[in-house]
Image (cartoon, rainbow, N blue to C red):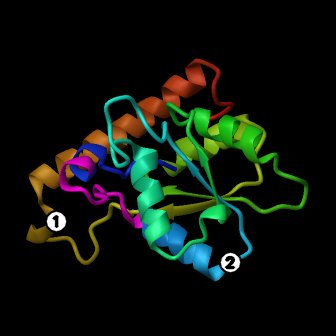
């Protein structure tokens, strides 16, 4: 799923840039190489927008990264209509028309995974396999090194965003559970 791309920086510097959640690309590319017959889908916003170059959108950045990593472009389908988390499974399902017995894996950040899976379930994709990445945990024993106010406030902001998103999607009927 889209979300770690930095289109403005990518366009400004002429090469793809990722934010702090770029591990999803490492995981997705490793899975793609491990399973060479797998169909790949990138789900994000439009590939291009007026006035922007080829790296000016999330999908444009993704296409450049995926294409430069030795993945055959014919294996990748770009879903470019999704605007929010619950759009992804609906739009991807229409695009790829999954068949019974197929296995589908969704790769995104661990913190975002509960909301993503709730959206996939609501869209009728209850059998999707979650592949969480970009874990936001402090490893090692508790101590002075774990008391990082700015980092912890950023983490609290991200967690609040996800919890509020879960509640909002549930209250508006876009998901069936928290």
| Disc with the residue nearer the chain's start (2 vs 1) | 2
Residue 19 shown in magenta: yes
Location of residue 162 with respect to 38 vertically, above or below: above
Residue 160 shown in magenta: no
Quarter of the figure that contains the C terminus: top right
Residue 177 in the figure: left or right of residue 102:
left
Residue 10 lies, in percent from the top left, at: 26, 52
Residue, disc 2: 35
Residue at image location 42% in from the left, 63% down from the top: 65
Residue 61 in the figure: left or right of residue 20:
right
Residue at image location 32% in from the left, 36% down from the top: 52
SS majority, magenta? loop
Residue, disc 1: 146
* Residue 64, quarter of picture: bottom left
Magenta-tinted stretch? 11-23
Residue 175 lies, in percent from the top left, at: 64, 30
What secondary structure is marked by label 1? helix
**Cβ–Cβ below 8 Å for labels 2 and 1?**
no
Q: Nearer the viewer, residue 54 or 98?
A: 54
Q: CA distance from mark 2 to mark 1?
A: 38 Å
Location of residue 96 with respect to 107 vertically, above or below: above
């Amino acid at each position: 799923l889209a979300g770690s791309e930095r289109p403005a920086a990518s366009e400004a510097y002429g090469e793809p840039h990722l934010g702090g959640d770029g591990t999803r690309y490492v995981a997705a590319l490793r899975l793609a190489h491990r399973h060479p017959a797998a169909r790949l889908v990138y789900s994000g916003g439009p590939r291009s927008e007026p006035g922007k170059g080829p790296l000016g959108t999330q999908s444009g950045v993704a296409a450049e990264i995926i294409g430069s990593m030795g993945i055959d472009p014919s294996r990748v389908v770009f879903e470019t209509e999704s605007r929010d988390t619950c759009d992804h499974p609906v739009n991807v399902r229409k695009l790829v028309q999954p068949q019974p017995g197929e296995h589908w894996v969704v790769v995104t950040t661990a913190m975002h995974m509960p909301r993503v899976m709730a959206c996939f379930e609501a869209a009728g994709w209850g059998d999707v396999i979650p592949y969480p990445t970009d874990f936001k945990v402090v490893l090692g024993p508790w101590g002075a090194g774990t008391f990082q106010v700015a980092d912890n406030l950023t983490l609290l902001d991200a967690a609040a965003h996800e919890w509020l998103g879960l509640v909002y999607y549930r209250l508006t009927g876009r998901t069936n559970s928290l």
